[in-house]
Image: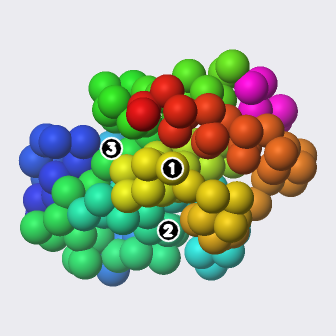
Amino acid sequence: MITLNINGRDTKIDADPSTPILWALRDNLNMTGTKFGCGAALCGACTVHMGGQAIRSCVTPISSAVGQKITTIEAMEADNVGKAVQNAWVKHDVPQCGYCQSGQVMSATALLKTNKSPSDADIESAMAGNICRCGTYQRIRAAIKDAAKSLA
């Protein structure tokens, strides 16, 4: 048994220490908001926060998360910055198919927690690892800028 702090709660997980966080969340805890995309940390669909940083949960073993705080999309509504991002996502009609959106929201939230007024270059850099197959990148950028303004 491994104990992880997920969304502010200590949670015991009965899994091999090499199990990726993604699969512990989805298979062991039935938390399906975090998505599987590529399994190689290339698409960003599996993004969660660990210790406040956006990470790819599909390649990060649960053993590396012991003693860290993991935050998932399920906790964003209760987070001031996460809620602002979600509101901006709706306002700008960002989702099309929606599959990548939890990872996009997690990366955008991590950006705005460290940079209250990101430039286009800052947004491009922070979001570079998140792929949207529907191509909603312009709306994503607009939503991030709007969320930043609402938090100012």
**Label 3 crowd bin: few (<14), some (14–19), many (20+), radius 10 Å:** few
Q: Residue 18, image x and y in percent?
A: 33, 80
Please name the residue shown 16% across and 42% down the image: 8
Q: Which region is colored magenta? A: 92-98
Q: Quadrant of the C terminus?
A: top left
Q: Nearer the viewer, residue 81 or 7?
A: 81
Residue bearing mark 2: 56
Q: Secondary structure at mark 1?
A: loop
Q: Residue 122, image x and y in percent?
A: 60, 65
Please name the residue shown 32% across and 32% down the image: 79
Residue bearing mark 3: 29
Q: Amino acid at mark 2?
A: Arg
| C-alpha gap between disc 1 and disc 3 | 35 Å
The reply to whether residue 92 is visible in this rendering is yes
- Which quarter of the picture shows residue 118? bottom right
Q: Secondary structure at mark 2?
A: strand
Residue bearing mark 1: 117
Q: Residue 11, image x and y in percent?
A: 15, 48
Label whose residue precedes the other's in the sequence (2 or 1): 2
Numbered label attached to residue 94: none
Our reading of the magenta stretch's main secondary structure is: loop
| C-alpha gap between disc 3 and disc 2 | 18 Å
